Amino acid sequence: MKFTGKRYLDYSSFIKLHFGERVQKISLDIGFTCPNRDGSKGVGGCTYCNNNTFNPDYCEPQKSIQQQLDQGIEFFARKGKNHKYLAYFQAYTNTYSDFESLKKMYEEALSVPQVVGLVIGTRPDCISEEIINYLDELSKDYFISLEFGVESTNEKTLLEVNRCHTFEDTKATYELCKDKGFHLGAHIILGLPGESREELFNHAKELSKLPIQTLKLHHLQIVKNSVMSVQHKRNPEKFDLFTLENYINFVSEFITHIRPNIIIERFISEAPKDLLIAPKWGGLKNFEIVAKIDKNLEIRNMWQGKFYNN
């Protein structure tokens, strides 16, 4: 697999190659929760989490799936660039319900004209073989992507951020999901408290062992109304947050250790200004930061997988 114009496999090129045109994700909030919020595994959620940091205005759980999709399609259609859409079950844990309820929700999304597939964000400890087999069947007719929040490959870190699952759980789940018809993705946060530079680079090696097709990266952000915002205020010395320049240099090196055939779906995600506490990078847009990463890779003659060792 090789795309042109980048020193890594980029998601936009992959989507255009797969569908023959640009396809837009539309985020959905169905009112799910998480097992480390509702008490089944823990309370308070992950220490870094405030889901309001990535929900668009049309994402309101009191609205039906069709209403959210219709409003999302109307919003993006104004730009006149999109004719196909992916329903993105994004907020919280989107396989954390009984099978029949999930099936009804996914099929409601797929019944909307112009929706050509599903992207489902979830946790590795909230999936069953029944759901996996169902998504495998759906993938015969639709584009299906299942994304797991890995967040860290370091067991100590996962415990400290109240993730309430282990990396061993993550690896076991990917084993259940591999060789199915749907795409597998992973999400990781770079710079969680206490992780050394060596441990951060080890994430690249461990992620490359997983049977994933796509990878989302972003740096740690301290956001309002999260447990971590209180921890940061009390003990700021425990947080070594990336500056913009340091992150650009680090993530450029990070992808040199990533398996060459993993599609990099995201390098950066910045919380809304009214929720972001730190770090603040001068209001640069995501695409501007990606352009700086692209330039840095070129200047330093780096590319995805340059130092990858199977």
Image (spheres, grey):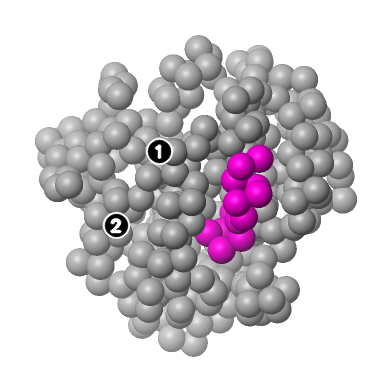
Q: Residue at x 48, y 56 (%)?
A: 173
Q: Which residue is mark 2?
A: 206
Q: Position of residue 34 (x, y in %)?
A: 67, 66
**Between 59 and 244, the one nearer to me in the picture:** 59
Which of the labelled discs sits on residue 213, or is there none? 1
Q: Position of residue 47 (x, y in %)?
A: 54, 74
Q: Position of residue 184 (x, y in %)?
A: 47, 42
Instruction: State the extent of the magenta-drawn residues as a range.
Output: 122-134
Q: Residue at x 50, y 82 (%)?
A: 231
CA distance for labels 1 and 2: 14 Å
Q: Residue at x 55, y 54 (%)?
A: 271
Q: Is residue 84 magenta?
A: no
User: In terms of sequence position, does the residue under pointer 1 or pointer 2 come before the other?
Assistant: 2
**Between 189 and 150, the one nearer to me in the picture:** 150
Q: Is residue 230 visible from the viewing direction of this image?
A: yes
Label 1's element? loop
Which of the labelled discs sits on residue 158, or is there none? none
Q: Residue at x 38, y 78 (%)?
A: 156
What residue occupies the far bottom of the structure in this picture?
234
